[in-house]
Image (cartoon, rainbow, N blue to C red):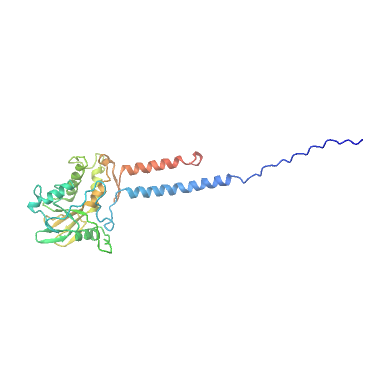
Amino acid sequence: MHMDLPEKPLAREVVKPVKGPSRLPWLIALVVLALAVVPLYFMWKAGAVGDQAAKPPSAATQQGQAGQAGVPTPPGPSKHGEVIELNKPEDAAPGGEQDQRKKQFGLDKSVDAVLRSDETVKVGDQSVPVSELERKLAVQSRGELLERPIDGSSQVSAWGVHLVNPNDNLWDIHFVLLREYLATRGLKLAADADEPTSGGYSSGVGRTLKFAEHMVGVYNLKTGRMSSDLSTLEPGQKLVVFNLSELFGALAKINPQELAQVRFDGRTLFFPADEAAAQQAESQALQQIPDQKR
C-alpha cells in the first residue's frame, strides 16, 4: 500500500536587511562644516557690532538725521528768511527765535545760533551759506567727498555755530555742548568730568569729546577755509560749526549711565551694549559646538 508521507516543511528564506552606507562620513562632513561656519559667524557678528558702534558718518551719507530716536528734528523756517544774523539781540533774548531753537536741542551757552542747512549765517557784513560750511567741513577738514542727489534734493539738517570769543578753547566749547546735551538725558556732569582718571587714563567723557572732534569744524571768516587745526582760535574771526543732527545722532546711542565704559579707538566710539552683545553671541555659538570639538 502506498502511503502519502507528510511533506517536508519548506525552509524559510531569511531575508537579511540590506546594510545602508555608513553615516560616519556624513557626521564628519557636518563637523567640518560647523568648524568652518563658526569663524565666519564671529566675523559677521564683529562686523555687525562695528556697524552699531558710533562712527563719524561720512558727510555724503549723513544729510541730517532728523527723525531718529532721541534726535530733535531741524527747526522750521525762520520768520526772518533764509539769512540768519548771528547774535542778533532780539533773537537771542528769552523767547526769541534763537532762544527757542536752542532750547529745542537743550543748548544754551555752547552755541550762538541753531540754523538749518538751507539757511545762511551772517556775521557782521559777511554771509556764508550753511551748505557751504557743510561742504568745506567734509572736503577741507575731513578729506571726504560731499555727494549730492542727482535731482538736487537734500534732507535738511540742523547746525550749531559759535563765534569764537577771547580766551575760548575748542575743548571747553565741546565740553559745554556735551554737558548741555547730557543734561537733557538726565545726567548732570561735574565741572571736572572731562579730566583724566586717577590712573592717568581718559575718562568716558574725555573719550567722547575726542570722538566729537571729528564732527566739528573751525571756519576762518578771513580766508574762507575750514580747518581741523584746533590749536589757534582767533576771536571774532572764526566760527566753530557743529552738524547737530549728525552729532546728536551719534550721542543718542550713549546710555548716560554707562558713559564711563565708552571706548574710543581713534575713529569709532564703542558702547558697552555692543561689547555685551558680541560676548553673548560668542557664548551661544560655542555652546552649539560639541565638547570634544572645542
Q: State the quadrant of the N terminus.
A: top right
Q: Quadrant of residue 121?
A: bottom left
Q: Residue 203's quadrant in the figure?
A: top left
Instruction: Residue 60: name its quadrant.
Output: bottom left
Depth check, front residue: 230 or 28: 28
Residue shown at the point (23%, 52%) measured from the top left:
245
User: x and y percent of residue 244 in the render?
Assistant: 21, 51
Is 277 situated left or right of 203 in this image? right
Measuring from the top left, give residue 40's x and y in whole percent: 44, 49
Total marks in image = 0
> Residue 194: in sight, yes or no?
no
Q: Nearer the viewer, residue 34 or 261?
A: 34
Q: Answer left or right for 187 relative to 127.
A: right
Residue 288: horizontal and vertical position, in percent?
46, 41
| Residue 279 in the image, given as x and y percentages of width and height | 38, 42
| Residue located farthest toward the front when viewing the structure as drawn | 1
